[in-house]
Image: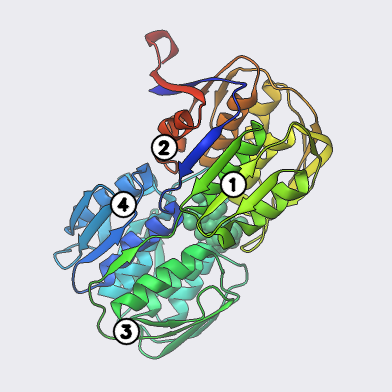
Amino acid sequence: MEKLLIQGGTPLQGRVGISGAKNSAVALIPAAILADGPVVIENLPHIQDVEIYVNLLKDMGASVLFEDDWMEIDARPIHKTFMPNGKVKKLRASYYLWGALLGKFGEAQIGLPGGCDLGPRPVDLHIKGFEALGATVENCKGVMIVRAKKLRGARIYLDLVSVGATINIMLAAVRAEGITTIENAAREPEIVDVATLLNNMGARISGAGTDVIRIQGVDILRGCRHTIIPDRIEAGTYMIAAAATGGDVVVENVIAKHMEPVSAKLRELGVEIIEGDDAIRIIGKKEYKAVDVKTSPYPGFPTDLQQPMTTLLTLAEGTSIVTDNIYSSRFRHSDELRRMGAAIKIEGRSAVVEGVTPLTGAKAMASDLRAGAALVIAGLIAKGNTEVEGLEHIDRGYENLVQKLSNLGAKVERVTLGEAEQ
Ligand code: EPZ
């Protein structure tokens, strides 16, 4: 077991390169199963979720080469569509195997996913989509068995905007006979990224990135090459960290448009943001004014950044209200922030943050991936030293975190927990 040791008080300065998007990678890798030839994916981040997916595909028989930042997947040798619970449970996004295997083989038997502790994370909309396409879905002792003799195009309305359901239905529908439309589809950039890969394979998808996606099923999907989009959540995390430490940071290899909800909110706080084509400069200030944050599906403010934002808002003069409209209990980081001196009250789906409360270093435990990011930022601004444990969460979504922060001047190191601390 390891922990991060962070000495607070240093403004971040310099340039940081953003890695490929985790929430694209965990969909693109299973999507490659659909191809009748090798698929090469470039700009893949070396993060835990990607490593787990590589192992899952190899367990199924696929050939996977992963070196530097590119991966070649040849799914032709896959000989099994049953995956026991074990590894699958470690990865929330393992549910994309349902759609990919259903599309390719007409069958999938995959354990229900695990993932972050953000409150209930149902998959009823995924199931609704598969059944609309003609599949039968049953939950057999925690293993989802999805089968279809023939997939037929359908008109599917999603009661809730769901990234996972939108992508999963797309993965099955590309091989369905006829036309599928997904209405009230999610519009996240990662959905566009998956549609781009599938179309490069020969699929016929239009409307990705809008709330109506149309898919004309095809018989053959061939191998191709694809470069993942940059990770807008990683980029937003560094932007918030730069603002919180009063630093001056350029985040490179970003798509500025994807960052608009974050840039707009930071400007509202008083942060100076200068946008280039594929880079954004963040100039932090000594004082910020309180703002309210309400998360919503893209292009709204991302729920994945409300936790890091909450840390920044401890530095804003006045009362800030952070409302998460996507997840009902994504506030466990606030317990840890309170222990460091933050004044945060949880009221329903909102965290009420009173600023300005100087934070003091403490031992903190990450409960999920983005809570971990919030605690790392707290350590960067707190007086004294902070120890952050629960790195198994942080490693899921932040490539080379210590290296990237150190290159920005942060005093942070990763150490092994002593015997007594285990
Ligand atoms: C994706 O999760 C992301 N994960 C999450 O990022 C992100 O927070 C979330 O989208 C929202 O943007 C990946 O892409 C791997 P949803 P997903 O389906 O697809 C409800 C991170 O930190 N819902 O868009 O699982 C659901 O409970 C992670 O990188 C249903 O009710 O999220 C939630 O309230 C955390 N039924 C809302 O919809 C369903 O069948 C949005 O969920 C599906 C979802």
Above or below, 255 against 35 in this view is: above
Please give the residue where the numbered disc 4 appears in the rendered image. 53
Please give the residue where the numbered disc 3 appears in the rendered image. 150
Q: Residue at x 45, y 31 (%)?
A: 407
Give residue 395's mark. Answer: 2
* Ligand 1 within 8 Å of the CB at mark 1: no
User: Who comes first in sequence, dot 3 or dot 4?
Assistant: 4
Position of residue 259 in the picture relative to residue 59 (left or right): right
Real-space Cα distance between discs 2 and 1? 25 Å
Q: Residue at x 41, y 37 (%)?
A: 395
Q: Position of residue 286 (x, y in %)?
A: 74, 31
Instruction: Give the mark toward the camera: 1 or 4.
Output: 1
* Type of the residue with mark 4: Tyr
Please give the residue where the numbered disc 1 appears in the rendered image. 281
User: Who comes first in sequence, dot 2 or dot 3?
Assistant: 3
Dot 2 lies on which element?
Answer: loop
Q: Position of residue 412 (x, y in %)?
A: 48, 23
Dot 3 lies on which element?
Answer: loop
* Type of the residue with mark 3: Lys
User: Who comes first in sequence, dot 1 or dot 4?
Assistant: 4
Position of residue 25 in the picture relative to residue 34 (left or right): right
